[in-house]
Amino acid sequence: MSGKTHEELVTGQFGARAEAYLASAVHAGGEDLRAMAEMVRGHGAARLLDLGCGGGHVSYAVAPSVAEVVAYDLSEDMLAVVAKAAAARGLDNIVTRGGAAESLPYADAAFDFVFSRFSAHHWRDFEAGLREAARVLKPGGRAAFADVVSPGVAVLDTFLQAVELLRDPSHVRNRSRAEWEDATARAGFLPRVARSARLRLESAAWLQRMATPPVQAEAIRALQEGASADVRRHFAIERDGSFTIDTALFELERR
């Protein structure tokens, strides 16, 4: 047993892999990232919070269009990579700040935009993180959350959570689209647009990015090989273990 807090587990998992996430093709591109960049066009005076910034891809995409981006993450190693990459790209309006999503060190209504991508499934307290995001966003401000989503069917959900946890013990939960919609409404957001997509994960790169130990990688393959036809069909599991997941982008407005 590790005896670590969830925050220590997250920083331990991602700190040593910061460069891998910066280089990840899955994280560096996608329609959701392009949609976020489009949301901020024409808002040159805006201040934006990139919540759980990871390798910083949201920050790099939006920085040319706004006045300031705060790249916020629990991992100081991730933030160091983001600061270095931002400087190399000439994006001097990106600043970094460390901390947890559930306790943001900012005043109410401090931001015009709050964006978060592939982060929320790691939050210790999902709803507290959403409430904090709403608190620091100006009334009428825009938010965007992109993440892997659960299919919402029990057998498919169980498989997804199991392989995610085996790959990365800091994984908490992928919520369904309905869970996202209910939780964001409770936090104080109004829905605008919800976009669904499918994302193929190449098995070797997916495991290597998190340096998943062989015993856990073997357990994932065993689950895939023993899965029911319904599970194999939904996740389009391939011979080499590559598979396809559901993702969603929720564009929201602060009440």
Image: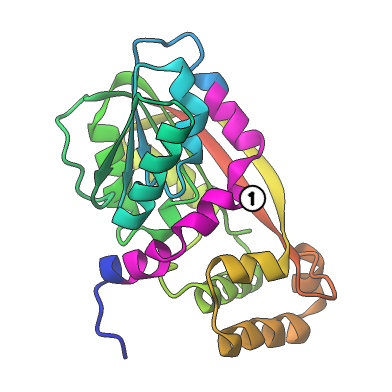
- Does residue 114 appear left or right of residue 135 in this picture? right
| Three-letter residue code for mark 1 | Val
The answer to if 26 sits in the magenta stretch is: yes
Identity of the residue drawn at 64% across and 40% down: 29
Identity of the residue drawn at 19% across and 48% down: 103
- Does residue 154 appear left or right of residue 76 in this picture? right
Q: Main secondary structure of the magenta part?
A: helix
Q: In what element is the residue under mark 1?
A: helix
Return the residue found at the far right.
239
Q: Tell me where residue 230 sits by quadrant.
A: bottom right
Foreground pick, 68 / 109: 68
Judging by the rendered image, the residue that carries numbered circle 1 is: 26
Please say if 142 is above or below 96: above
Q: Tell me where residue 225 sits by quadrant.
A: bottom right
Identity of the residue drawn at 63% across and 58% down: 151
Foreground pick, 128 / 38: 38
Q: State which region is magenta.
A: 9-37
